[in-house]
Image (cartoon, rainbow, N blue to C red):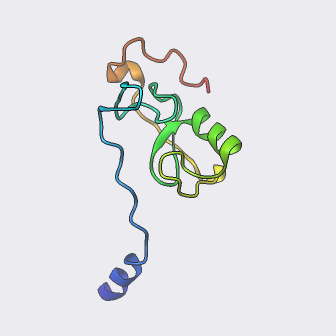
Amino acid sequence: TNGADSRNRSHLPIPPPPMPPNVLDEFDQIIDKWSCPICKEPRINPTASTSGYVFCYKCLVSHIRQKGEYCPVTGRPCRETKVVRLFEPTASRRGVAGGISNAADM
């Protein structure tokens, strides 16, 4: 069975690597692992696209509804029904200045 398992896995696409922490974007803003790739702010209601990148829920769903069902980072297909809500430490526990006052706000 081990050979059959490895053959099945070889047909799966290789996911893209995650964005490296603390890189500069085109506006020379520091993007860290806690920032949304769309709004560049600490994520509120973190949500994973089907490609594995994590965004604010509001940012990702707005992108999907307005621009199409694809990941804004990778361009891979991403349907709204397939995004996954994640549970991360709050901004105040991560040491983000100012914190997030109400994570329930979208």
Height in image: 26 above or below 78? above
Q: Position of residue 58 (x, y in %)?
A: 61, 33
The residue sitting at 39% across, 56% down in the picture is 16
**Number of numbered tags placed on the structure image:** 0
Quick check: 82 left or right of 96? right
Quick check: 84 left or right of 28? right
Q: Position of residue 41 (x, y in %)?
A: 46, 25
Height in image: 100 above or below 67? above
- Pick the quarter of the image with the C terminus: top right
- Pick the quarter of the image with the N terminus: bottom left
**Quadrant of the image occupied by residue 14:** bottom left
Q: Nearer the viewer, residue 38 or 106?
A: 38
The residue sitting at 37% across, 13% down in the picture is 97
Q: Nearer the viewer, residue 82 or 61?
A: 61
Q: Position of residue 2 (x, y in %)?
A: 30, 85
Q: Nearer the viewer, residue 67 or 47?
A: 67
The residue sitting at 53% across, 45% down in the picture is 72
Most extreme residue toward the right, as rendered? 65
The residue sitting at 37% across, 84% down in the picture is 7
**Quadrant of the image occupied by residue 27:** top left
Most extreme residue toward the top, as rendered? 98
